[in-house]
Amino acid sequence: MLIHQGASPCASPGRSPYQRKLSFKSPVSNWTEEEVQNWLKKKKLVDLCNTLEDLEGSHLEKMYDDYCRDPKEFKHEMRSDYQMTAKMCLKFIVALEKLIDHN
């Protein structure tokens, strides 16, 4: 069981990220690859469409969970595994946070 210590970008006031994850279920988890691609385009992340072409909504949720667990490692992996620039990585993270936190 993973329990976070200290502030996290994913923690809601009064709840740890782990508690938030337990209560987290959004329509994003049901998104198809096409819906993910449409979201990327809507958020002006077109440059990521080819890189993230096989992702479904459940993958976005997993990516968000990974970001919550270790933001620094997540950014490193996104930059190395997906060849994202620092700016593109930041834009993706901001869009992902808004998507998940508002569903």
Image (cartoon, rainbow, N blue to C red):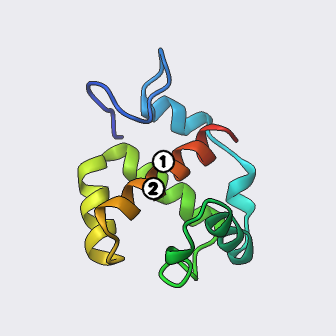
Image position, residue 34 (x, y; %): 73, 77
The residue under the point 50% across, 75% down is 48
**Compared to 12, does 26 lie above or below?**
below
Image position, residue 21 (x, y; %): 52, 39
Q: Residue furthest top?
A: 14
The residue under the point 39% across, 44% down is 68
Give the residue pinned by disc 1.
94
The N terminus: image quadrant: top left
Image position, residue 13 (x, y; %): 48, 17
Tell me the kind of residue under disc 2.
Lys
Other residues around mark 1 within 10 Å, as few (<14) / some (14–19) / many (≥20): few
Give the residue pinned by disc 2.
91
The residue under the point 62% across, 59% down is 43
- Decide which of 6, 39 is in the foreground and name it: 39
Direction from residue 2 to residue 10 in the image, left or right: right
In which quarter of the view is residue 35 placed?
Answer: bottom right
User: Element under label 1?
Assistant: helix
Tell me the kind of residue under disc 1.
Val
- Decide which of 37, 67 is in the foreground and name it: 37
Image position, residue 3 (x, y; %): 33, 33
Other residues around mark 2 within 10 Å, as few (<14) / some (14–19) / many (≥20): some
Discs 1, 2 touching: Cβ within 8 Å: yes
In which quarter of the view is residue 25 placed?
Answer: top right
User: Element under label 2?
Assistant: helix
The residue under the point 48% across, 48% down is 94
| Label ID, residue 82 | none
**Compared to 35, does 60 lie above or below?**
above
